[in-house]
Image (cartoon, coloured by chain):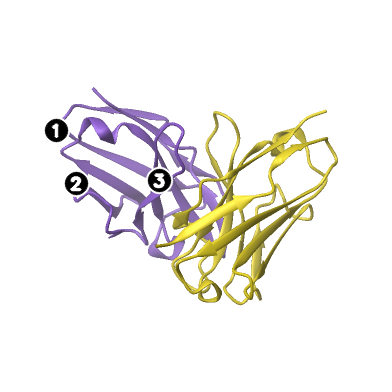
Chain colours: A purple, B yellow
Amino acid sequence: QAVVTQEPSLTVSPGGTVTLTCASSTGVVTSGHYPYWFQQKPGQAPRTLIHDVNYKHSWTPARFSGSLLGGKAALTLSGAQPEDEADYYCILSYSGVGVFGGGTKLTVL
Amino acid sequence: EVQLLESGGGLVQPGGSLRLSCVASGFTFSTYGMSWVRQAPGKGLEWVSAISGGGDFTSYADSVKARFIISRDNSKNTLHLQVNSLRADDTAIYYCAKGLGVSATNPDYWGQGTLVTVSS
């Protein structure tokens, strides 16, 4: 089973920009891995921010965007807000089997 | 409004079994793939299993293959996960999730989860 790797932790200043990445042990991440990004706050179920590389849901704040960057999936937060402090997870699909990354704990400080 | 309501969790002894259920509403259940994702206490998310809208395609994580069985009853808008031969490391919140299409295996819209505790 493939391994998906994320930064364990990142810190961003309020109003700043940060990019979280999602790498695959099998090589370059492509749209065929259907990368998704999720946000989870303490005590809550996860919610989907980005699906299929860069598509947003109606509830996704405009400051979040998804992309493919340097062979990885990426989630960029532009103009961080205190309420963005949370755990962020990506998932990649390998022929119908999903694999989550270990998650990134994002601190807004 | 999409709603997913999980049930069936609880305390079970090692080696035991449970049947988790997820009742869906607010969408045409049979036209969406569904999945289960779990989260051990204080740990990250782990994708467990998925099933296509018609139930003809299923997939499993290596960690649960041959022990867990995913199924669905489209007449009752219900998703199931039969969990067998439970081990301590199966202790987790189990989330039911709706996919974005009939063959979707990624979770998109999440339920609130049901807690499974494996302990003697």
**Residue B90 position within the rendered picture, expressed as x and y whole percent measured from the top left:** 70, 39
| Tag 3–tag 1 contact (CB < 8 Å) | no
Q: Label 3 sits on what residue type?
A: Cys
| Residue B112 picture location, percent across and down | 51, 46
- As displayed, is residue B43 above or below residue A67? above
Q: Earlier in the sequence, mark 3 or mark 1?
A: 1
- Amino acid, disc 1: Gly
> For residue B26, which quarter of the picture?
bottom left
Residue A20 image point, x, y percent: 32, 40
Residue under numbered circle 2: A63
Q: CA distance from mark 3 to mark 1?
A: 23 Å
Q: Do the residues at discs 3 and 1 belong to one chain?
A: yes
Left or right of B83: which side holds A75?
left
Q: How many neighbours does mark 3 have within 10 angstroms: few (below 14), some (14-19), or many (20 or more)? A: many
- Taking the image as shown, residue B31 lies to the left or right of residue A1, namely left
Q: Is residue B63 left or right of residue A3?
A: right
Taking depth in this image into account, of B94 and A75 the one nearest to the observer is: B94
Cα distance in 3D space between marks 2 and 3: 19 Å
Visible residue check, residue B32 = yes
Mark 2 touches mark 3? (CB < 8 Å): no
Q: Which residue is mark 3?
A: A22
Circle 2 Cα neighbour tier, 10 Å, few/some/many (<14 / 14–19 / ≥20): few
Residue B74 horizontal/vertical position (percent):
62, 74
Please tell me which of labels 1 and 2 falls first in the chain.
1
Closer mark to the observer between disc 2 and disc 3: 2
Numbered disc 2: secondary structure? loop
Residue A15: which numbered mark, if any? 1
